Image: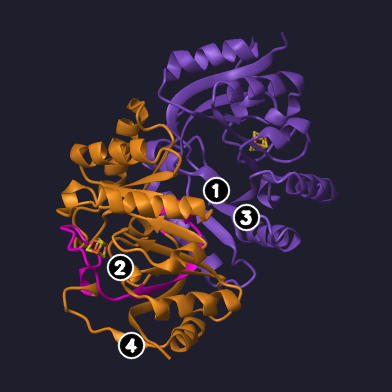
Chain colours: A orange, B purple
Amino acid sequence: MSRIPVLEVFGPTIQGEGMVIGRKTMFVRTAGCDYRCAWCDSKFTWDGSERARMLTPDEVWAELVAAGGRRFNHVTISGGNPALIRDPMAELIALLHGHGIRVGLETQGSVWQDWFVEIDDLTISPKPPSSGMDTDWAGLDVMVRRLSDHGVHFSLKVPIFDDTDLDYARRVHRTWPEVPLYLSVGNPDPSAGGDVAAHLLARLAWLVDRVVQDEALNAVHVLPQLHTLLWGNRRGV
Amino acid sequence: MSRIPVLEVFGPTIQGEGMVIGRKTMFVRTAGCDYRCAWCDSKFTWDGSERARMLTPDEVWAELVAAGGRRFNHVTISGGNPALIRDPMAELIALLHGHGIRVGLETQGSVWQDWFVEIDDLTISPKPPSSGMDTDWAGLDVMVRRLSDHGVHFSLKVPIFDDTDLDYARRVHRTWPEVPLYLSVGNPDPSAGGDVAAHLLARLAWLVDRVVQDEALNAVHVLPQLHTLLWGNRRGV
Ligand code: SF4
Ligand code: SF4
């Protein structure tokens, strides 16, 4: 059986952001990313600081059950970029569905996988200028069109750190106005300790104010990262 | 033209809770409620402290445009209980749709209106024991069945103040397992001033912990009231 590079299996907890914010879910975090975002809050998935375990889909399921028992029916797959994994991921998704589990997944949209159309809650999160990464707009357009044609339940999500990022979000919204767009408050220092809630709420108020003023950003959702509000920058919650 | 008792028209802002949390929207708040919840955060809609203005749907639209310009494409109708209003509300909903506006509405589910099936994002929010109100389970069941049959995009939402409320939520979820259930952290003192964010986040952490432990509450969303986190108990934001 093929294997998936896994860094973390944890939960149940709640989804902290985006289209299924608040949803009770388990998390599986895969290793490896083709991006190097300046503010990446999961650098340990690609900077070599932690070693992934190569698990079969059955072993991932066993770890989910060990951690979550019967206390979950939703699993979120995140990374890194889980779209770097082809066949073993398709197997994991099929296995989860076979157990009656709903599957969410987040990827930056740099790589297509045919199993995208099997995901129940798919977030495509293109990275704005503050990330230091470039967006392949043509490639993303092909992806968005395919997902729409297949009737996939998906959304676009852009973290916003500054006004330049907001310009980028406007372009995203103008390009794919029919796709739900989620803007989230960027977490500028994911290694900061202590009480980051007050700071994040102030950033959220700024972002809400910006969006409220802007007629080019009407059909959007503005959301915080609930997990950061609740638990600061701690991992595994 | 028939008239609607209106207490507030404001926005754009973001929806603070429930199934479209974070969505940029305008608010129209109607007067009058058939309930008297102990912790009602909108007592001014029914306690006689404020006088409603009787507005035609055209006048409501004019006020929305005066406040929001072209900076919105979603309107949330709340109360009080907006389901107490029949024909004028049906006219307002049709008028909004005619302008390309998406319409959200929240009601406790004590009264059915045929225009429920026209609502784009409908929240039915039955009130748990801490409210001091009784639930008509049979009536609610007829409502949920009708909404499901009509393919309405709707959810159930229960504010949770204590463990007895959580028992009530379990019963709701057991009764209508196929309907998305949103649990929100109750705001015990909606008249409290100052920084209520820290207190609400502590309550949210409690609720998340409860839900995470509970295999009878798997397909649920746990959410805070974003507007309260952002602006405390201020009105009109
Ligand atoms: S795409 Fe995601 S995981 Fe990859 S570097 Fe950027 S933020 Fe980190
Ligand atoms: S149903 Fe809503 S508006 Fe009516 S009393 Fe209860 S909380 Fe207040």
Tell me the residue that label 4 is attached to: A54
Give me the C-alpha separation between circle 4 and circle 1: 43 Å
**Residue A237 image point, x, y percent:** 38, 69
Q: Classify A45 as above or below A137.
A: below
The subunit letter for the residue under badge 2 reads A
Give me the C-alpha separation between circle 3 and circle 1: 19 Å
Tell me the residue that label 1 is attached to: B186
Kind of element beneath mark 1: loop
Tell me the residue that label 3 is attached to: B180
Residue type at numbered disc 2: Asn
Residue farthest to the bottom?
Answer: A1
The residue drawn where x is 67% and y is 25% is B46
Q: Are marks 3 and 2 in contact (CB under 8 Å)?
A: no
Residue type at numbered disc 3: Pro
Q: Residue B5's image quarter?
A: top right
The subunit letter for the residue under badge 3 reads B
The residue drawn where x is 60% and y is 11% is B58
Q: Say which of marks 1 and 2 sits in front.
A: 2
Q: How crowded is mark 2: few (under 14 residues within 10 Å), some or many (20 or more)?
A: many
Tell me the residue that label 2 is attached to: A81
Q: Mark 3 vs mark 1: which is more N-terminal?
A: 3
Q: What stretch is highlighted in magenta?
A: A16-44
The subunit letter for the residue under badge 4 reads A
Same chain for labels 1 and 2? Say yes or no: no
**Residue A114 image point, x, y percent:** 43, 67
